[in-house]
Image (cartoon, coloured by chain):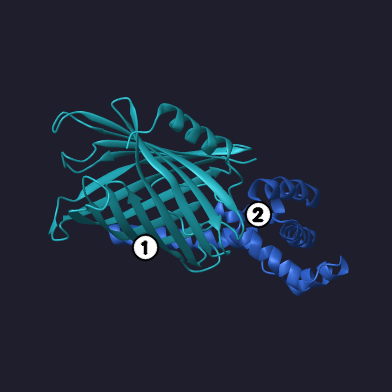
Amino acid sequence: MFKVYLTLAGLGFLVGGCASFREGAPEISPAMTKLGQASGDSFEKLVTGRRLLATRCTTCHALEPVSKYTVEEWGGIVEDMADRSGLKEEEENAIQAYLTTVRKTL
Amino acid sequence: MKLQKTTCTILLGISLLGEVASAGDRRFTYVYETTTAAKGEIEVENFATWKTRGEGSGRSNEFDFRHELEYGVTDRLQAGIYVADWKVADGQAIYKDTAFELIYNMTNPVTDLLGSALYGEVKLGDQLFKLEGKLLLQKNFGPIVLAYNAGIEAEWEGDRFGDFNERSGEFMESFGVSYQFSPYFLLGGEFLHELGFDEWQEAGDPVIYAGPNASFRFDRFYVTTTAMMQVTAVTDEADFQWRAIFGMHF
């Protein structure tokens, strides 16, 4: 019985974790790429932003769903957190570009 | 080696004032996470540990302190130096050792199936020399983080530097689970299992500790703390230990 609970807990973590990652750092769709390019942000910049969000930010905390905040709110959050976590300017810009682009498509 | 009170005060002062931005607020105090500092980043962490032992083998209290300076050599390789490990016993501050560590991050706990890293440490004091290696594993499931460490260490001790006539080994493993209630408050637990080998031969009694863990994050600083009870009955090991790690951001 214990093994069943353990397996269910493992599956629960896996599903919950994947859902959390999908909502916190969605994959870059063609629509996002197009929107980003229209704003002067290349696909590579968006990819870098997503990678940094998934690796640097999660060092301290779980990712919040992108839909939770507006573009303006994300701007303030990233600015605050960049200062706290020591992100370089280009890294901050990449995360801002990614979050702005994703949020606009939601 | 007994340090003068002023030296200790200066050491503590430097470590507190010199704290700089840390990319990784720790979720655990005994368990290492697989993530490392970003390239060029410097982190300073201060540890305080209290260990107490009951009446069985004589009541004792020990207060240990550590000041660690970490540097991101690359985005995957982190070097660290324990500027000083020291303890307070009988009202005296006593220097114990200085250590050098390397952590190499292999996979990420969020983007890869399982986060992993290798940990190596060399420790040198006036009465000991120690080598330690660990495998670090971690997986982040959104707000839930699971981490596991397993490692071995070899230690040489003696009455004075260079005369290390006692040797011992240890297998250790630790496990931590942490849940993020909010980005400012995380709660979890840690487990520690140690198995010593005197003269690298005979295994001693296994010692297991378990206890709750909490991490508080504020705007410019964080505190992570764990209280661990010994769940085995090994009398010459601490019955209870409490550890706190302090970090600040400027």
Assign a secondary structure to mark 2.
loop
| Outermost residue toward the bottom in this view | A30
Task: Establish if B73 lies above or below B62.
Answer: below
Identify which residue is drawn at 74% across, 58% down: A99
Q: Residues within 10 Å of mark 2 (few under 14, many from 20)?
A: some
Task: Establish if B166 lies above or below B186.
Answer: below
Between tags 1 and 2, which lies in front?
2
Indicate the position of residue B192 as horizontal and vertical percent values. Answer: 30, 49
Which residue has dot 1 on it?
A7
Task: Establish if B165 lies above or below B17.
Answer: below
- Hue used for the chain lettered B: cyan
Indicate the position of residue B45 as horizontal and vertical percent values. Answer: 50, 44
Distance between the alpha carbons at the discs numbered 1 and 2: 27 Å
Which residue has dot 2 on it?
A65
**Rendered-image quadrant of the N terminus of chain B:** top left
Mark 1 chain: A
- Does residue B68 show up? yes
Is residue A34 shown left or right of residue B90? Answer: right
Circle 1: residue type: Thr
Which chain comes out blue in the rendered image?
A: A
Indicate the position of residue B51 as horizontal and vertical percent values. Answer: 30, 35
Q: Nearer the viewer, residue A71 or B149?
A: B149
Circle 2: residue type: Pro
In which image quadrant can residue A88 be found?
bottom right
Q: Nearer the viewer, residue B14 or A30?
A: B14
Identify which residue is drawn at 74% across, 67% down: A46
Indicate the position of residue B50 as horizontal and vertical percent values. Answer: 34, 34
Mark 2 chain: A
